[in-house]
Each structure stands twice: as C-alpha cells, then as structure tokens.
Image (cartoon, rainbow, N blue to C red):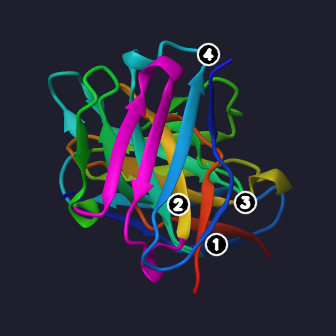
Amino acid sequence: DIVMTQSPSSLAVSAGDKVTMSCKSSQSLFSSEYQGNYLSWFQQKPGQSPKLLISLASTRETGVPDRFIGSGSGTDFTLTINSVQAEDLAVYYCEQYYSYPPTFGAGTKLELK
Amino acid sequence: QIQLVQSGPELKKPGESVKISCKASGYTFTNYGMYWVKQAPGQGLQYMGWINTETGKPTYADDFKGRFVFFLETSASTAYLQINNLKNEDMATYFCARYGEIPGDYWGQGVMVTVSS
C-alpha cells in the first residue's frame, strides 16, 4: 500500500495568515497515461464528514473558495490556504487514489493561535 | 441534489452485530461504487473497502476481512455495512462515500457505533 505522510500534525494560526501543509507519498502518484496526479485533499470539521476540496492535486471542487490552492506532483504535494478564515479551522487530509487501496494521510489539524 | 443519508447512531454489546445503511439520492446509484471509511474516536480516516454497485461485488481492505460485510439493496439505492461479532475496537464513526473517478466526492453524515457491555 502507498503510505501518505502529512506534516505538520497541527498548525496554530491567526485569521489572515497564509498556511501551507505538506503531504508526501511513498511512491509517485503521477499517471503518465492520464497526465495527472491522483491525489485529493479533504477538509473535516468537528462532528462533520470529510468534504472534498481538491482532486487531481490541484483542481478545486465547485464552491471551494479560491484561497485553497493545491500544488505538487509525483510524491510531494502542498495545500496552501491564503488568508485563513475562522471557518477554515478543521483537520485536512490528503488521500491517494493512484493505486488500490486508497490511503489517507494522518491529517493536519488547523487550530487557532 | 446528490445526497448520501446514513442511519442513526448505534449502541451495541460486544459480540452483537450492527447493520448501517447508506441511502443514495440525486444520481444513478449503479453508476458509482460506494466505499466505507472508519474513523475511531480522535483518529484519522481508514479505508475499509468498497462495493461495486453494478455487480454487488464487495472488496475488503486487509484489516476488514472476516467480520465486515458490504451489501446492497439496489432497488432502494441503498448500501449497507454489517459488522458481526462486535469488538471494543469497532467503536468508531463509519462513513459511506461515493466511489467514482474521484473517490469521496460525496459522503454520508457518518454513523457512530458505540460498543459497551
């Protein structure tokens, strides 16, 4: 199975900060056949189910604010949140779907400073 | 709109069984698979496996072979997770999620299963 490693495990932020979090995979998630990286980012707020924010490493889902930016390729990926808002406090998970079974990282928890 | 609505919380004793439902609406049920995810209290997301909604064939992740069963009621656009011989370590929230080209584009609200004697 592909191992997904997220860092940091938690991040203390203030409203308006720019935040970056990392997700590394144990093997490349890039498909040369389809020319894409098979990685998603999810946001999970307390008591809620995960919400898909970004797929294919950098494609925002409909309705996701443009302050959320996914980047990276191969084995190294980043989720950047420009100007964090209070409503962004949550746990963020990356997930690879390049190979079966899909695997999740352990998450990065965004907390208020 | 697309929705996955799961059944309510469950309180069970060790050794009992539990059946969790996930009713899909707003899309053609058999066009997308369904996968199941376990989240233990305060922990991350663990993929349990998926079921092909066209054929009914389940596939289980290694940690979920044996006591866990995925099945369908296709006429009702509903997927089920049954856990047999419940153990304390099964205490968790269980999510269903749609499994298409982009896994997890829609999720159910989750079902909390409490196991206590």
Quarter holding the C terminus of chain B is: bottom right
List x then y, in percent, for residue A21.
52, 60
C-alpha separation, residue under disc 3 versus residue under disc 1: 20 Å
Q: Is residue A63 left or right of residue B116?
A: right
Of the pair A19 and B46, the residue shown nearer to us = B46
The quadrant in which residue A40 appears is: top left
- Is B38 drawn above or below residue A51 in the view shown? below
Q: Is residue B71 magenta?
A: yes
Q: For the residues tagged 1 and 4, is the chain the same?
A: no
C-alpha separation, residue under disc 1 versus residue under disc 2: 9 Å
- Residue ranking furthest to the top: B28
Q: Badge 3 is on which residue?
A: A47
Question: Which disc, if any, is residue B26?
Answer: 4
Choose the circle earlier in sequence order: 2 or 3.
Answer: 2
Q: Please report, as a chain letter, where disc 4 is located.
A: B
List x then y, in percent, for residue A86.
84, 56
Of the pair A80 and B75, the residue shown nearer to us = B75
Q: Badge 2 is on which residue?
A: A21
C-alpha separation, residue under disc 4 versus residue under disc 3: 24 Å
> For the residue labelled by badge 3, is the local secondary structure a helix, a strand or a loop?
loop
C-alpha separation, residue under disc 2 versus residue under disc 4: 34 Å
Q: For the residues tagged 3 and 1, is the chain the same?
A: yes
Q: Amino acid at mark 2?
A: Met
- Label 4 neighbourhood size at 10 Å, few (<14), some (14-19), many (20+)? few
- Label 3 neighbourhood size at 10 Å, few (<14), some (14-19), many (20+)? few
Q: Badge 1 is on which residue?
A: A11
C-alpha separation, residue under disc 2 versus residue under disc 3: 22 Å
Q: Is residue A19 magenta?
A: no
Q: Are marks 1 and 2 in contact (CB under 8 Å)?
A: yes
Label 4 vs label 3, nearer the camera? 4
Over which residues does the magenta segment extend?
A: B66-91
In this rendering, does residue A103 appear at all? no
